[in-house]
Amino acid sequence: MKKLFLFLTITVSTAFSAQTLIQAYQKRANQITQTNIDTYLAEFASYGIKSTGSTNNNNAFNWLKNKYLAFGYSESQISENAFSYNGNTTKNLILTKTGTTYPNTYVIVCAHYDTIGGPGVNDNGSGTAVLLEMARILKDVPTEYSIKFINFTGEEQGLRGSQNYVSTVVNATNPKMNIKLVFNIDQVGGVAGKVNNKINCERDTNNSPSTNNEASAAVTQELMNCVSLYSTLQPNLSYAYASDYMPFQANNEVITGFYEYTESTKPHTSGDTLANMDPTFVFNVAKAALGAVQHFSVADLTFLSAADCPPEKMLSSLKIFPNPTSTTLFIDLLNLNLRDFSFTISDFNGKTLLKKQNEKVIDVSQLPNGVYLGTLQVEDQYKTQKIVVQK
Ligand SMILES: [Zn+2]
């Protein structure tokens, strides 16, 4: 019996050898902050009921776009996929990060941002917050496969946004878009006052078609492994239904997903608020999701931190943009874990006009048109460049 047991042990460990913990993935998962998650959720809530095609829905779209720009992504990485609902225009937002080895094969990570009957902070501000935090952290991380972060609209009207995307983008190119897998994140807010320590990992059990089910089971197993490796949550095997992965499923793509295990009764009501959910659960889900997205996209195994890289070397690569600017400057810290930096704007006489501590988005709208000196300080190192304000 012992010999047989040993044999089985070896077989199992070989089968999952691709999924031991990767330090760099864990370090990036640890860059997720509760403060950021809370901020995204509060901002999402502030747009009210984001019914498909409504002004609030369009405002939330613009908020998302500005978030990605503030993280340092460029306009050219962001595209919209618009369609009409009840005579109004509504838009899916697609952020594309190009892969190093397989630029034409995509890992799609999606969450809908439209809501119905309430502010939808759980359904689906939670998934939206997870997507934002992952996009922020992965911005300068090379991945072998391309990633598309997609914020869908029209989900609550019957998966309109994802259906539109599959028909007008995925299938509308020749050859058809090559998708490695679709990872959907919907309603991962948990329930206030309850223990939220499990996450449903959803595989495809749908039989039209069934040809993609086996591959979905395999990636869902990998997703479950990532939950255990990169978060404190326990994975629970469940099945996919009624969210934005389904139009991809029908298109014979490989799908998987996250959905809360302890299910809230608040979605689609005015009670779907921050107060009724568990933001710590969203934080933990984000860690699991970031571990999984790095695994699926095969992210770089090297983790660059301030400790690994002396400030004088690092400073030269940090970016302050756009320049010229009219209202706002962004400081791109390349995901380095810099806790202590400052940014000062002075005139050519050396007079300090503005000084910000540890802020990456600098409001310069109060400055008149002109040329200034911007100085970024990290520890005792300085980088100074001309900043042009032009309205
Ligand atoms: Zn939803």
Image: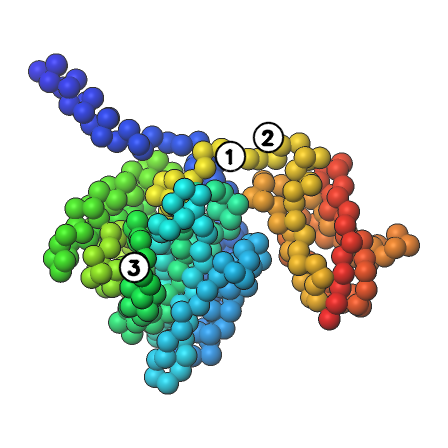
**SS for tag 3?**
loop
Q: Residues within 10 Å of mark 1 (few under 14, many from 20)?
A: some
* 338 with respect to 226 (left or right): right
Q: Quadrant of the C terminus?
A: bottom right
Residue type marked 3: Lys
Give the spatial CA distance, label 1 vs label 2: 9 Å
Residue 73, x across and y down, in percent: 54, 55
Residue 102, x across and y down, in percent: 38, 45
Circle 1 or circle 3, nearest the eye: 3
Query: Which residue does the numbered mark 2 point to in the structure image?
Result: 308
* 223 with respect to 363 (left or right): left
Do labels 1 and 2 touch, CB within 8 Å? yes
First-in-chain label (1 vs 3):
3
Q: Residues within 10 Å of mark 2 (few under 14, many from 20)?
A: few
Residue 155, x across and y down, in percent: 31, 69
- Which residue is located at x 40 percent, y 82 percent? 88
Q: Is residue 240 above or below residue 333?
A: below
First-in-chain label (1 vs 2):
1
Residue furthest toward the bottom? Answer: 87
